[in-house]
């Protein structure tokens, strides 16, 4: 039974002009998720440009530069709902120089859709996008072989691309890969089944997104509760109330559980869990709740409540796959603020172990520079311990960002390895 309030986030990636924006436009158009006034505006723009029908790509290209050049530069987010599910789409750019935007758009996704032009097959850009999907541990990948109308809907062309992609994905850690032959322009296998490709027995893309099992994507084993603030109402009804508020990052916490507060190591038992005025017996990710303990312990923002028999590692030295997001290159041994769950510390990049050559996906050793769009494995030292899991085990407690104190800009995002 599907929860029809369940939210699925998916990101689209592909080379320039593979038809990502057209695919999203087709998805919104055929699933009737577009407001009348939006449709009218886009029909008018399409007419002005001399298009015979509606230019579906205009639904997503929000920036003026993009509309003028007909390409996607920034990450465009779109929201739509069907009777079965809610969706957030991140339409990310295909150019090499926008690798950081793809990392940003894909970091919270359940599904990555990778577009391949049926005429060109698997190209460098496809490998790059598959690599980033694998690096970001996106649980599901849908490979959309688009523009099938331009290869006469050939089953052989499709099968050849499937085997090309399977060769590269076998070397990466991608758990679930599915393939769909489609024509986004004509609407084949996007929302409706294609009559031109009766040889394809699978579902159209929307049906696949609506029925994909994503409940197990969240880590339900490791209970992690980063404390955001301490609640002390001090009013007549809550004279002695002391609750620790935050969002359950992963796992399940129940009343009566033995817990440890990290990094102090103090232990206690959960006395009550509150969600607004409700008392709950248990809380699970991603609920925002307040937890009361049997004992008065000194707990503050940045501490983490975990089960006593299942603790994360407390460490000041962490290894991270880092994507540099800023125009200004990293300064050697400069201090940054590291943000990890609700915990902010000062940190320094001690060492660049290797960089990834985004063209060949090979490791480059001996290069300590980090500039915009670089992806590298680095060693970071923090002033106080962080309570970390690896990103593969837990995307929430395994991710960090770095902020430049002088400009307050986010300069890098990283996955703990």
Image (cartoon, rainbow, N blue to C red):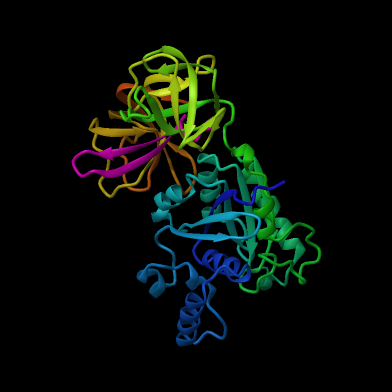
Q: Position of residue 35 (x, y in %)?
A: 51, 72
What x and y, as percent, mark residue 158? 71, 60
Residue drawn at x 76%, y 57% is: 202
Q: In which quarter of the view is residue 160 placed?
A: bottom right
Q: Give me the residue at 40% from left, 31% from top.
A: 245
Quadrant of the rendered structure where residue 345 is? top left
| Image: 336 above or below 358 | above
As drawn, 151 above or below 315: below
Q: Position of residue 139 (x, y in %)?
A: 60, 42
Of 184 and 284, nearer the camera is 284
Q: Nearer the viewer, residue 396 or 132?
A: 396
Please state the horizontal and vertical placement of residue 140, each as a whole percent of the image: 62, 45
Q: Does 120 sit left or right of 151 as displayed?
A: left
Asked if the stretch drawn in magenta spans residue 406, the answer is yes
Q: Name the image quarter holding residue 61.
A: bottom left
Q: Residue at x 33, y 30 (%)?
A: 233
- Report the front residue among 113 and 266: 266
Is residue 317 left or right of 194 when viewed as pictured?
A: left
| Residue stretch rendered in magenta on the structure | 392-417
User: In the rendered image, is residue 37 in sight?
Assistant: yes
Residue at x-position 74% and y-position 68%: 194
Name, please, the residue furthest toward the left: 406
């Amino acid at each position: 039974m599907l929860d029809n309030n369940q939210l699925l986030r998916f990101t689209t990636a592909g080379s320039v002009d593979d038809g990502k924006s057209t695919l999203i436009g087709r998805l919104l158009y055929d699933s009737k998720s577009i407001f009348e006034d939006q449709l009218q505006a886009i029909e008018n723009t399409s007419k002005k440009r001399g298009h015979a029908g509606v230019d579906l790509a205009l639904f997503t290209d929000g920036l003026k530069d993009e509309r003028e050049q007909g390409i996607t530069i920034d990450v465009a987010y779109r929201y739509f709902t069907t009777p079965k599910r809610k969706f957030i789409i991140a339409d990310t750019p295909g150019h090499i120089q926008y690798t950081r935007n793809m990392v940003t758009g894909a970091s919270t996704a359940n599904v990555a859709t990778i577009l391949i032009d049926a005429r060109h097959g698997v190209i460098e850009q496809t490998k790059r996008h598959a690599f980033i999907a694998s690096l970001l541990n996106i649980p599901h990948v849908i490979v959309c072989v688009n523009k099938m109308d331009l290869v006469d809907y050939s089953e052989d062309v499709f099968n050849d691309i499937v085997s090309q992609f399977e060769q590269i994905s076998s070397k990466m850690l991608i758990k679930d890969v599915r393939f769909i032959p489609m024509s986004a322009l004509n609407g084949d296998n996007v929302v409706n089944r294609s009559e031109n490709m009766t040889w394809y027995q699978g579902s159209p893309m929307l049906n696949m997104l609506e029925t994909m099992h994503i409940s197990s994507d969240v880590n339900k084993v490791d209970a992690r509760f980063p404390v955001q603030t301490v609640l002390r109402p001090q009013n007549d009804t809550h004279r002695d109330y002391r609750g620790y508020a935050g969002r359950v990052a992963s796992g399940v916490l129940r009343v009566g559980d033995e817990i440890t507060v990290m990094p102090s190591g103090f232990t206690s038992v959960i006395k009550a869990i509150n969600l607004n005025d409700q008392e709950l017996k248990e809380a699970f990710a991603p609920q925002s709740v307040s937890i009361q303990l049997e004992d008065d312990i000194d707990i503050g923002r940045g501490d983490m409540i975990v089960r006593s028999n299942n603790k994360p590692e407390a460490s000041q030295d962490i290894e991270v796959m880092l994507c540099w997001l800023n125009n200004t290159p990293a300064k050697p041994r400069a201090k940054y603020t590291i943000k990890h769950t609700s915990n902010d510390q000062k940190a320094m990049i001690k060492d660049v172990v290797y960089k990834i050559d985004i063209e060949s996906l090979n490791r480059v050793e001996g290069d300590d520079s980090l500039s915009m769009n670089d992806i590298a494995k680095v060693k970071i030292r923090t002033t106080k311990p962080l309570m970390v899991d690896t990103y593969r085990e837990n995307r929430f407690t395994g991710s960090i960002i770095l902020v430049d104190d002088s400009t307050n800009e986010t300069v890098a995002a990283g996955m703990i390895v």
